[in-house]
Image: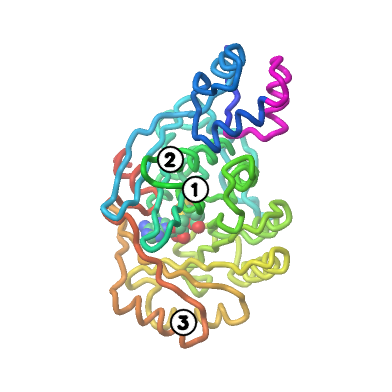
Amino acid sequence: MKHPKHHFFSMTPETLTDWCLERGLPKFRAKQIFEWVYLKGVIDPMEMSNLSNLDRKMLQSDMAFLSGPTVAHQLATDGTQKLLIEWSDGGVDAKEAGVDHESRLPILGQEMPYSDTTRQTECVMIPAVDSDRRTACISSQVGCPVGCTFCATGIGGLDGNLSAGRIVEQVWRLNQLEGVGRISNVVFMGMGEPLANFRPVVEAVKIIAAPWGMGISARKITISTVGMHKAIEKLAEELDLPVTLALSLHAPNDALRRELIPWAEFTSILDLKHACKKWFAKTGREITLEYVLIGGVNDQSEHAIELVHVCKDLRANVNLIRYNEVAGLDFRRPNTEDVHRFQYLLREGGVNCHIRASRGRDIAAACGQLRHEHAGT
Ligand code: SAH
Ligand code: SF4
């Protein structure tokens, strides 16, 4: 079997320099290749005009750049664009599923074969209405092991993890969309639970933030997690970059949270608050609490009042998100007056809170919805 090509988007200056030296290319080629790809957006070695012919050919035969076709590309009326990428030649690595009951961490590194049929993930480019901000919303896994009852991604379970390179590649591909301008922000709010694919996500964030890589400041990168407190603490220890952490809370008490988020069984809101405080102590960054308002489920006055108590001793901003309905799921979008009352009650209680504008509604931009529609899963 032919040895698989190296994937460019997982490379660092150290690994690319080694790759060059092993193949007899001069050491300075690594810097030139990074500039072609990340600064000039060129991935065809034949266009890399300051490389020798031989080196271009070596790059062409031994390095993979894009690792799969775009099988759907949608453009919403508000300028939001969504890509469905098929990771066709393997590279969706070790499958991790479940939670280790003792350490209360997602189980790491269990090798399992991935499914042949569902290796598609989504990524979305969201342009700001009032500024140059261009946000890339990217996936970390193929499917998701958590299985939140309201989420389209959760329906099919987990099919595999994305490698660091494939996570970075999504940002690069969105950055190349015509007439869009440079991606300025990255959010891990596509498919998958980033902290259940811990190591590749950490590596990818480093490449996205690196000046020789995508060059996007860590402060403009948001990792959204359903929240395993030990994994949050581990991230604070190991990432060592001031990224923004968004915690998907969605309920003001453990009982309701556990109905919506199966993995909430392994943690409590109190544990999560401790982890958030440690995160703040280590990074100096306030946490964003995500709260998807689902009609009649978690959007009533009593929930808002309880949420005020949860937030009281936390340095957090609350993001209220209106639920996007998912075909086949029995949850509905909240009423407008309930959303406004919810926000009013939080603000009255001294909680900093915003209602997030829904973008790309006409292309079902909530995570997992395009794959869901495309595959009929
Ligand atoms: N697994 C991570 C990141 C991906 S989901 C997490 O759950 O945080 C990103 C965000 O989208 C989460 O806050 C999630 O609750 C929210 N979300 C999922 N499905 C949604 C839907 N149908 N409508 C609105 N928000 C949704
Ligand atoms: Fe997974 Fe996040 Fe969807 Fe829950 S909301 S199933 S954690 S992607």
Q: Nearer the viewer, residue 176 or 68?
A: 176
- State the residue at coordinates (64%, 40%): 212
Alpha carbons under labels 3 and 2: distance apart: 35 Å
Residues rendered magenta in the picture = 9-28
Work out which quarter of the rendered image holds the N terminus and state it. Answer: top right
Tell me the kind of residue under disc 3. Answer: Leu
Residues at circles 2 and 1 in contact by the CB criterion of under 8 Å: yes
Q: Secondary structure at mark 1?
A: loop
**Residue 339 appearing in the image:** yes
Which of 88 and 231 lies nearest the eye of the viewer?
A: 88
User: Crowding near pointer 1: few (<14 within 10 Å), some, many (20+)?
Assistant: many
37 and 95: which one is in front?
Answer: 37
> Does residue 158 appear to the left or right of 217 in the view shown?
left
Q: Which amino acid does the dot numbered 1 rest on? A: Gly
User: Picture coordinates of residue 46 (x, y %)?
Assistant: 50, 19
Residue 25 in magenta stretch? yes
Q: Quadrant of residue 287?
A: bottom right
Mark 1 CB lies closer than 8 A to ligand 2: yes
Residue topped by disc 2: 121
Please report whichever mark, 3 or 1, sits nearer to the chain's N-terminal start.
1
Residue to which mark 1 is pinned: 192
